[in-house]
Structure formats: structure tokens, C-alpha cells
Image (cartoon, rainbow, N blue to C red):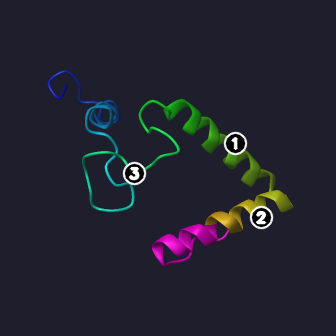
């Protein structure tokens, strides 16, 4: 694949397809993925749609956006031990 393309995104997609996502938040880079809600390779379209939908909610700056952002920020802080920026 590396001889056929110099597009980093294309190479990353092929690597994800072949080796899987590894440990998304850790150091493991192989074996059975721990993400059970989705397959990062085959579900890329729906993940992209979800990301766009969340960004649209944030752009509206409504109470719903604030609640959603605060929930995400709390989970981020619990997982990484540091705060996210403000909305």
C-alpha cells in the first residue's frame, strides 16, 4: 500500500482496516479492539455523521448544547484527569 499511495489518510485507513484500532486511549496497538459500540473502520460514515450533528448542536449555543458539552467535559476530565476548554 505504501508503494501505491502517499496519501496519509488513505494509508491510515488501510492500517486501521488491517490491524484494527488498538487501544484508543492507551498504548496497546494490536489485537481485539476494546471499543464495543462501533467498528472504527466500517462505521466511519456514521461516526462522521454523529460528529457533524454534535457540532451543529454546539453551534446553536442553546441550553441543550451547554448540557451536552458539560457531560462530555465531565467524562473527558474523569478519563484524562484534566479539563477541556470552554464552549
Which quadrant holds residue 42?
Answer: top left
Residue at (50% x, 78% y) in the render: 82
Q: Residues within 10 Å of mark 2 (few under 14, many from 20)?
A: few
Q: Is residue 32 visible?
A: yes
Identity of the residue drawn at 58% across and 33% down: 46
Label 1: few (<14), some (14–19) or many (≥20) C-alpha neighbours in 10 Å:
few
Measure the alpha-carbon separation of dots 3 and 1.
Answer: 25 Å
Image coordinates of residue 44 in percent, x first then y, are 49, 34
Q: Position of 35 compared to 46: left or right?
A: left
The first of marks 3 and 1 along the sequence is: 3
As helix, strand or loop, the secondary structure at mark 1 comes to helix
Residue marked by disc 3: 34
Q: Which residue is mark 2?
A: 67
- Give residue 25's position: percent from left, percent from top: 39, 60
Residue numbers of the magenta segment: 73-87
In percent of width and height, residue 29 lies at 25, 51
Q: Nearer the viewer, mark 3 or mark 1?
A: 3
Q: Is residue 35 left or right of residue 85?
A: left
> Label 1: which residue?
53
Whether 87 is drawn above or below 1: the answer is below
| Location of the N terminus (image quadrant) | top left
Q: Compared to 2, does 34 lie above or below?
A: below
Q: Residues within 10 Å of mark 3 (few under 14, many from 20)?
A: few
Quadrant of the image containing the C terminus? bottom right
CA separation, marks 3 and 2? 27 Å
User: Can residue 87 be seen in this snapshot?
Assistant: no
Q: In the rendered structure, which disc, 2 or 1, sits on the residue that comes first in sequence? A: 1
Q: Is residue 82 magenta?
A: yes
Q: Residue at x 50, y 40 (%)?
A: 38
Magenta highlight on residue 22: no
Q: Secondary structure at mark 3?
A: loop
Amino acid at each position: 500500500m505504501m508503494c501505491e499511495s502517499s496519501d496519509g489518510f488513505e494509508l491510515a485507513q488501510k492500517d486501521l482496516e488491517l490491524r484494527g484500532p488498538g487501544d484508543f486511549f492507551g498504548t496497546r496497538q494490536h489485537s481485539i479492539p476494546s471499543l464495543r459500540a462501533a467498528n472504527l473502520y466500517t462505521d466511519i460514515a456514521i461516526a462522521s455523521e454523529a460528529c457533524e450533528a454534535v457540532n451543529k448542536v454546539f453551534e446553536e449555543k442553546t441550553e441543550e448544547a451547554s448540557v451536552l458539552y458539560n457531560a462530555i467535559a465531565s467524562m473527558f476530565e474523569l478519563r484524562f484527569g484534566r479539563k477541556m476548554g470552554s464552549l
